[in-house]
């Protein structure tokens, strides 16, 4: 309806692990659309295998754009219709998994740590935003349009339907009740027309704060990543991610900061949290502070690390080291150089830890 498609400019990417033997035939108004392997959208190359190999070369901007596009276009497509019924965890999963894979963080890294590190918004917040915008749009329309009628009857029937699964309005109310705004939906439809658009920005602001506070509280109470709250001092994207680091450098610093289970570098693993003996000296503990400050087998990489840091930051604790060098634009590369030299001394992969954690 009213959608004009430029056939010459419209391409199809069929996402699949392996290349299909024959391309699917997709027609628009009887004309065949060209099936291609890659497509560049807003500067990000989408490959049919679903990997962002080109996007990875310049880490932050491209990866963040790819994440936003994937979440925005594929995942949130029509989310006001189907997304409200999902639980928060289900909604947040795709974005968290994307970042965990990209930064090689352990699978068990909590979602709140991933979001706080990246400074990314909750997917559920984007979904509620899209839903509220849709409602405002419908409220502006004539009462007799199909969409206005649907909304009106959804709201009218909401109190009478007990199961949230069968009521879209009930699902929406559940989300708005997080900020105690669910009552708004119970107002007469004509009144809602005036009140709802005024309240939308306020609700989004409140929900943003609510979700951020929830993540922050989970972080400070976390027994899983107890040291993370000491190096997460601002609720914004960590500075090193904004300095457009190379991906391997971002990966090693992110893993070091999260300090959970293990550090991986290429195909080698070093355990963390005292899970096994130090793979370098086989005597010391397998902890971040042992590797960075104590291990006798890692004297050379340590020297090069300290030569890159400010003179007053030779502390014996990663938390202090990070906080002292928070503004040092070379810190990410210095940590990367430490790990790459350290791992080059490790003959083969540590057998105690499978890489899947
Ligand atoms: Zn050691």
Image (tube, rainbow, N blue to C red):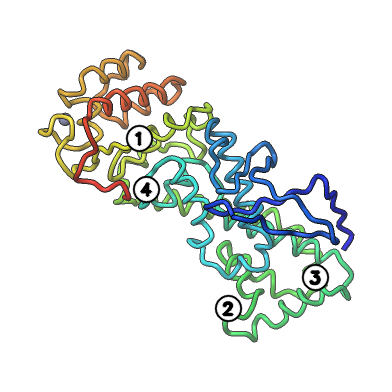
What is the distance, in whole Å, between disc 3 and disc 4 at their CAs?
42 Å
Instruction: Check disc 1 and report the residue beneath it.
Output: 266
Who comes first in sequence, dot 2 or dot 1? 2
Q: Is mark 1 within 8 Å of ligand 1?
A: no
332 vs 129: above or below: above
Dots 3, 1 in contact, CB < 8 A: no
What is the distance, in whole Å, between disc 3 and disc 2 at their CAs?
27 Å
Q: Secondary structure at mark 4?
A: helix
The percent coordinates of residue 267 (x first, y second) are 32, 37
107 vs 195: above or below: above
Q: Secondary structure at mark 3?
A: helix
| Farthest left residue in view | 283
Q: Give the number of callouts.
A: 4
Q: Count neighbours of disc 4 (C-alpha within 10 A) and say few if under 14, some if 14 to 19, many if 20 or more.
A: some
What is the distance, in whole Å, between disc 1 and disc 4 at their CAs?
31 Å
Quadrant of the displayed image that contains ligand 1: top left
Q: Which mark is residue 125?
A: none
What is the distance, in whole Å, between disc 2 and disc 4 at their CAs?
34 Å
Q: Nearer the viewer, mark 3 or mark 4?
A: 4
Who comes first in sequence, dot 3 or dot 1? 3
Instruction: Check disc 3 and report the residue beneath it.
Output: 191
Q: Nearer the viewer, mark 1 or mark 4?
A: 1
Q: Count neighbours of disc 3 (C-alpha within 10 A) and say few if under 14, some if 14 to 19, many if 20 or more.
A: few
Q: Residue at x 19, y 45 (%)?
A: 352
Q: Nearer the viewer, mark 2 or mark 4?
A: 2
Dots 3, 4 in contact, CB < 8 A: no
Dots 2, 4 in contact, CB < 8 A: no
Q: Nearer the viewer, mark 3 or mark 2?
A: 2
The percent coordinates of residue 241 (x first, y second) are 50, 32
Instruction: Check disc 4 and report the residue beneath it.
Output: 220
Who comes first in sequence, dot 1 or dot 4? 4
């Amino acid at each position: 309806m009213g959608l004009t498609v430029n056939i010459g400019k419209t391409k199809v990417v069929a996402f699949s692990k392996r290349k299909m033997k024959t391309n699917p035939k997709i027609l628009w108004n009887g004309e065949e659309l060209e099936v291609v392997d890659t497509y560049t959208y807003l500067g990000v190359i989408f490959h049919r295998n679903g990997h962002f190999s080109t996007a990875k070369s310049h880490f932050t901007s491209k990866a963040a754009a790819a994440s936003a596009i994937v979440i925005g276009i594929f995942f949130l497509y029509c989310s006001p219709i189907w997304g409200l019924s999902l639980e928060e965890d289900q909604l947040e999963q795709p974005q968290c998994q994307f970042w965990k894979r990209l930064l090689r963080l352990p699978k068990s890294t909590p979602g709140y740590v991933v979001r706080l590190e990246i400074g990314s918004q909750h997917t559920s917040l984007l979904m509620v935003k899209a839903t509220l915008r849709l409602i405002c749009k419908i409220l502006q329309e004539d009462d007799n349009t199909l969409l206005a009628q649907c909304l009106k009857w959804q709201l009218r029937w909401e109190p009478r339907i007990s199961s949230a699964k069968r009521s879209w309005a009930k699902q929406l109310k559940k989300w708005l009740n997080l900020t105690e705004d669910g009552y708004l939906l119970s107002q007469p439809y004509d009144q809602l027309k005036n009140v709802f658009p005024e309240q939308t920005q306020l609700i989004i602001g409140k929900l943003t704060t609510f979700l951020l506070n929830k993540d922050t509280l989970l972080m400070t109470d976390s027994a899983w990543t107890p040291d993370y709250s000491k190096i997460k001092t601002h609720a914004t994207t960590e500075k090193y991610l904004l300095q457009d680091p190379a991906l391997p450098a971002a990966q090693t610093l992110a893993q070091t900061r999260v300090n959970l289970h293990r550090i991986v570098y290429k195909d080698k693993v070093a355990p963390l949290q005292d899970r096994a003996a130090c793979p370098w000296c086989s005597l010391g503990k397998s902890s971040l502070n042992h590797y960075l400050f104590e291990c006798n087998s890692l004297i050379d990489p340590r020297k090069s690390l300290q030569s890159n840091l400010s003179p007053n930051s030779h502390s014996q604790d990663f938390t202090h080291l990070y906080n002292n060098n928070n503004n040092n634009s070379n810190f990410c590369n210095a940590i990367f150089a430490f790990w790459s030299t350290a791992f080059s001394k490790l003959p083969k992969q540590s057998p105690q830890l499978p890489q899947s954690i």
